[in-house]
Amino acid sequence: MTQSTINDHLDNPPGDPEHSTHHIVPVGTYLMVFAGLMVLLVMTLVAASFDLGEANLIIAVTIAVLKALLVILYFMHLRWSTKLTQVFAGAALVWLLILFVLTLADFFSRSWIHMPA
């Protein structure tokens, strides 16, 4: 066996169909994702230029989540990953939401405590 054959064997072990092929993403897909990110960037700038009260926060977070989803799905290849990888990515998202909820609960409950003068 040559060194390249050994490396190929180590990279793609026999009997492992899940890891035997690599997904090749067309350049057009990356260009479409890039265009989508640029559109979302412009939407962020436009939304920030208007004073919509509390709706500004909701709009900004929604746009940020959409941008994060595009990056995670396409640039991090989560769309074509194994189910186990997707489960762990979902678990990370759930953990992040738990941390946000606990932090916000602490932040909003601070007005309940009256500090002595």
Image (cartoon, rainbow, N blue to C red):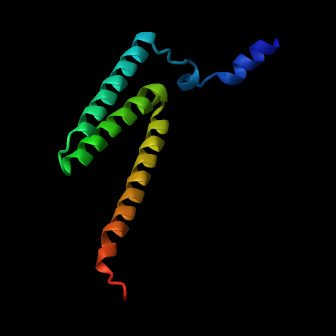
Instruction: State the count of labels.
Output: 0
Quadrant of residue 3 within the rendered picture: top right
Quadrant of residue 40 within the rendered picture: top left
Front-most of 92 and 102?
102
At x 48%, y 29%, the residue is 81
Residue furthest to the bottom: 116
The x and y percentages for residue 57 are 26, 48
The x and y percentages for residue 90 are 41, 44
Residue furthest to the right: 2
Tell me if residue 1 can be seen.
Answer: no
Quadrant of residue 21 within the rendered picture: top right
Front-most of 38 and 94?
38
At x 42%, y 52%, the residue is 96
Tell me if residue 109 can be seen.
Answer: yes
The x and y percentages for residue 102 are 38, 64
The x and y percentages for residue 36 are 33, 23
At x 29%, y 42%, the residue is 60
At x 31%, y 72%, the residue is 109
